[in-house]
Image (tube, helix red, strand yellow):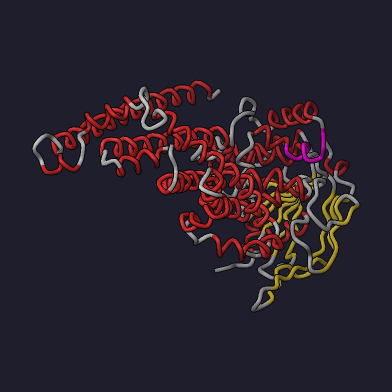
Amino acid sequence: MDRERQIKNKMITMQHVAKTFVTERKTTRIIDDISLEVKENELVALFGPGQCGKTTLLNVMAGLEKATSGEIIVNGEKVTRPGPDRGFVYQTLALFPWLTVMGNVCFGPRMRGISKKEREERARYYIDLVGLKGFEDSYPVQLSGGMKQRVGIARAYCNEPSVLFMDEPFGHLDAQTRYLMQDELMRIWEKEKRTIVFVTNNIEEAIYLADRVIVLTNCPTQVKKEYIIDLPRPRDYVDPGFLALREDISSVVDKTL
Amino acid sequence: MKVSISGAKEKTLRQMKAEEAAKNVLCALISIFVFCLVWHLGTRNGTKLGELLPGPVETLSYFFRGFAANIGTYTMVGHMIWSFMRVFIGYVIAMLIGIPLGVAMGWSKTANAIFRPIFEVIRPIPPIAWIPLSIVWFGIGEGSKYFIIFLGAFTAMTINAYAGVTSVDEVLVGAARMLGADEKQVFINVVMPSAVPSIFAGLQIALSSSWGVVLAAEMIRSSEGLGWIIISGQNTNNNVQLLAGIIAVGVVGFASVLLMREIERRLCSWTERGR
């Protein structure tokens, strides 16, 4: 399908957002005036050096943390606190260990008062979509790392948010599983298109997945440069175009110790 | 797709567990047997120890005969039930007060500021210290026993409920909020479930301290219960009865711990410990 046609409406607008952490001894500026836009059904990767404030930026966009100044608008509404119109997938998984896969995926709809029959039906669809059919009654402790993150993705999807935020969702996985999960995310996203903002510290992951890569500077972080990735999908890690982009992005990234 | 593999793995794991359990039972039987043998040999006729301590045959046969014949006014089972009921009533009152108090202190800073000072003063006082006062307040009957068992149990329950609530993972709270939970829903669906293992740890500590307290209370003033068996054995110079009473305490204590673990296993099947 023609991506230009799909990507038209603005889904996220950030204007002059800054974030400063105040502790007893000092104040630390983490985000230094960032303005950006994300369009509907676009997959944007936020890429930057370690500890540069990517996660803080994502938390602020999602409403998990308050911005010190500036404004974030998601789907026409100003973000001031956490809310179900935005989904979040955590690096640390953050699954509810006392709930089964079904219980975790159903959690959002249950909180919002959707009937048991309807929410379980919907959860079954997403559990199936992420490839966990047959594991509905398993507890997270019984699943492998990759499977746990599939639950995390299904849980975020099942609430049917307008935007999905993913904070290094595959960061804790081994290399093999990570490649597999990247392909899985592509498959899921092709089937169920959503606006996704994806934080990663892995340059290849950013190029492999995203429509657009936003390169961030060191802390206090700003937007360094943006890259539109128009390589055809599925992408190939050793494709010359891929390698050229990788080279190009590597050269602009701030080096940290 | 992976069913056959995981199925096969599970079976071998189950077999390994069964083998391990069989081995443990065997070891337990051998160790109990050897213990009794040493005890028997040490206390056989003519030894110095034998004059002070009855042998295992005598003690165990007294213990088991106690299930049929009365010791004092009740059978062994009767005494167990007396002690159990005292523990049970004091313990349940402690649960009804201690757990909500701990949860409230953990959840609300105001509640913590109000109750914490009183609690911290009461906490280090051993429950036995309250026995004279409780007799003054509640008389020598059942009331005073319930009261000190309550005191012995509620501190551990409160402090563990408090710890469970305050140690809730903030990321999980954030995740629940992102999924649309309000404050009340966060409390019911995230804070309480994650506090359950800690609350259970408190219940188990409280259970063993309750048994300690009920024995002390019965030894001071009672005419039934396991504490009475022990103290009346001492008063009548009947060491067999005294030892049988001690064994009964061990058996009942062990049974109540098994019961608690089983309840925990059912309620907390999602934790490593629960499984």
Q: Position of residue B26 (x, y in %)?
A: 28, 28
Query: How many callouts does the rendering have?
Result: 0
Q: Position of residue A103 (x, y in %)?
A: 68, 34
Q: Is residue A59 above or below residue A102?
A: below
Query: What is the chief secondary structure element of the magenta stretch?
Result: helix
Looking at the rendering, the stretch of residues picked out in magenta corresponds to A107-114
Who's the residue at 62% across and 48% down the image? B99
Q: Position of residue B81 (x, y in %)?
A: 47, 32
Asked whether, in this view, residue B46 is left or right of residue B225, the answer is left
**Which residue is nearer to you in this view: B130 or A152?**
B130
Who's the residue at 59% across and 61% down the image? B119
Asked whether, in this view, residue B91 is left or right of residue A114, the answer is left
Who's the residue at 18% across and 43% down the image? B52
Q: Looking at the rendering, which quadrant does residue B245 occupy? A: top left
Check if residue A109 falls in the magenta segment.
yes
Q: Is residue B199 above or below residue B82?
A: below
Asked whether, in this view, residue A135 is left or right of residue B253, the answer is right
